[in-house]
Image (spheres, grey):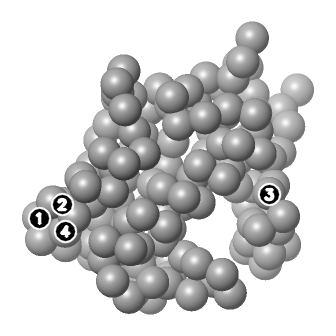
Amino acid sequence: MSERVIPASMQSHYDGFHFAPAVKDGGRLYCSGQLGVGPGDVVLADPGEQFVQAFENLATLLAEAGVAMADLIEMTTYHVDLAEHLPAFMQAKDRFVAEPYPAWTAIGVSALAFPGALVEIRAIARLAE
């Protein structure tokens, strides 16, 4: 049976947008996309800060489920202006994701759900056995 993971800081997303931030199922944690949204659901204006915040939001979600960034096995990122922002995104990613690296796919998109959002990070992590 699957279990929903909803950190207190993401309860409004569950209530307002009707989705679980993450779901535990079959030894895996499936994380919904995390944006660079800070307190009050405000998208940070600076791209580098936004990318760091997106990873911090992902780390919060993983911690709520009892896992860490080192448990990531797959990551898909969706980028507005991928080519322009990739160097700044890589700097943020390298602060949070270390070897052994997860599988990663980066996809360029025209827009994301929140106006001004430049990245969304979706991930799958291995749960402790």
Location of residue 5 in the rendering, given as x and y in whole percent from the top left corner: 80, 47
Q: Secondary structure at mark 3?
A: loop
Location of residue 119 in the rendering, given as x and y in whole percent from the top left corner: 37, 66
Quadrant position of residue 107: bottom left
Mark 4–mark 2 Cα distance, whole angstroms, equals 4 Å
Mark 3–mark 2 Cα distance, whole angstroms, equals 29 Å
Q: Which residue is mark 1?
A: 83
Q: Which residue is mark 3?
A: 7
Q: Secondary structure at mark 1?
A: helix
Q: Are marks 2 and 1 in contact (CB under 8 Å)?
A: yes
Q: Earlier in the sequence, mark 3 or mark 2?
A: 3
- Let me know if residue 74 appears in the view: yes
Q: Would residue 127 appear left or right of 109 to someone viewing this image?
A: right
Q: Quadrant of the C terminus?
A: top right
Location of residue 104 in the rendering, given as x and y in whole percent from the top left corner: 32, 37
Location of residue 58 in the rendering, given as x and y in whole percent from the top left corner: 57, 52
Which mark, by number, is residue 86? Answer: 2
Residue 108 to residue 93: above or below? below
CA neighbours of label 1 inside 10 A, class few (<14), some (14 to 19), many (20+): few
Q: Are marks 4 and 2 in contact (CB under 8 Å)?
A: yes
Q: Earlier in the sequence, mark 1 or mark 3?
A: 3
Which amino acid type is marked by label 1? Ala
- Let me know if residue 18 appears in the view: no
CA neighbours of label 3 inside 10 A, class few (<14), some (14 to 19), many (20+): some
CA neighbours of label 2 inside 10 A, class few (<14), some (14 to 19), many (20+): some
Which mark, by number, is residue 85? Answer: 4
Q: Secondary structure at mark 4?
A: helix
Which amino acid type is marked by label 4? His
